Image (tube, rainbow, N blue to C red):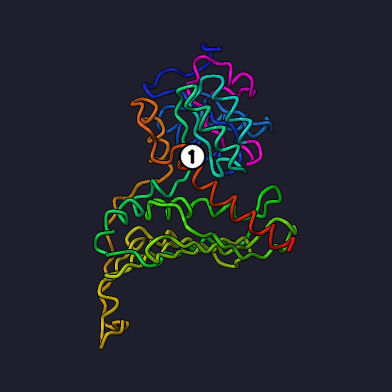
Amino acid sequence: MSNILNSNSSFPRVAVLGCGAWGKNLARNFSEIGALAAVCDSDTSKAEALSTLYAVPSLTENQVFAAPSIDAVVIASLAPLHISHAEKALLAGKHVYIEKPMALTVKDAQTLCSLAKETNRTLMVGHILNYHPAFIKLKELLPELGPLKHIYANRLALGRFRRQESVLWDLAPHDISIILSLVNEMPLTISPTWHSFITPDKPASALLNLTFSKGLTAHIHASWLSPFKEQKLVVMGEKGIAIFDDRKPWAEKLVLSKDCYHWHEGQIEANDQFQTESIPLAEAEPLKNECLHFLTSIQTGKTPLTCGEEGLRVTHVLEIAEQTLHQRKVA
């Protein structure tokens, strides 16, 4: 097997398992980095197309797990398959990068975390916004915002409709991940509202309300039913408001508004004269940053930023939200 794999890179050798819409992006990035060793998909036509494009072999799942020259498996298969693919990869001694959602139950996420520890393999979850230059810079600006009061995130589009998981598992992991990163604690309460539209037990639009200690609140609006796209995070503190709008051009993706409020006779009031500035960013592809982070985590042995335990925390929030949805339906 090893003689058909490209071994010219000093990076760990990666196989991308799942060559759909996002798997194509992962294959492109790992190829550009020089780490792509193979591709794999149950739909062999998809794998063969990428095999030809990037001059790497198209392998079966068993070949991927058995190949000694493949160091890591990047899992971009359908969400219900994540657990089985990740388990097989870890048991085969491969490092694993797994796209969101990490798993569809807390039990499965815990299994993967435990298995990664037992096998001493790197386990990383594809929560890409943690690697976005705008979000990285936003975290640096937190002291200028003062104590956080409220965070909200909108992730809206029309489709792609899924029937195997709800919009919560499809879109909300991104924003749950970055909100937990900003707050650095788990929510005290998790309360969802939703609209099914397509499948009775699979929400297509959902609003997730979270509460944290010290009065901090957050909400996430995730929807497949919006006629326009929106990918926006708003972080409100006592001293200012930061807005990360990923639909904007780079020069406008991150803006900071200061002195938005003032106190008058013991009451807080909006300040119409507040100042807003665009924050300069170094342009970089977040997915490329994420792929490089995975590879360097393997090389250094350091825990990835979005490690398995981080993915477990996100899964925990999602599972509670889904359980609450079902309990309300039964009631």
Task: Out of 131 and 173, give the one closest to the viewer.
Answer: 173
Determine which quarter of the picture holds residue 182.
bottom left
Residue lying farthest to the bottom in this orientation: 265
Is residue 87 positioned above or below 293 on the image?
above
Which residue was labeled with disc 1?
125
Q: Secondary structure at mark 1?
A: strand
| In this picture, residue 117 sits left or right of residue 84 | left
Task: Out of 10 and 139, give the one closest to the viewer.
Answer: 139
Is residue 122 positioned above or below 148 on the image?
above
Q: Position of residue 289 (x, y in %)?
A: 38, 41
Quadrant of the frame with the N terminus: top right
Q: Is residue 210 magenta?
A: no
Q: Which residues are magenta?
A: 56-81
Task: Out of 106 and 285, give the one closest to the viewer.
Answer: 106
Kind of residue sitting beneath label 1: Val
Residue at (39, 27) in percent of width and height: 298
Residue at (64, 40) in percent of width and height: 78
Quadrant of the frame with the C terminus: bottom right
Q: Position of residue 235 (x, y in %)?
A: 37, 64
| In this picture, residue 33 sits left or right of residue 163 | left
Determine which quarter of the picture holds residue 202.
bottom right
Q: Residues within 10 Å of mark 1 (few under 14, many from 20)?
A: many
Give the mark count.
1
Q: Position of residue 165 (x, y in %)?
A: 66, 49
Determine which quarter of the picture holds residue 251.
bottom left
Q: Position of residue 272 (x, y in %)?
A: 29, 83
Q: Is residue 78 magenta?
A: yes
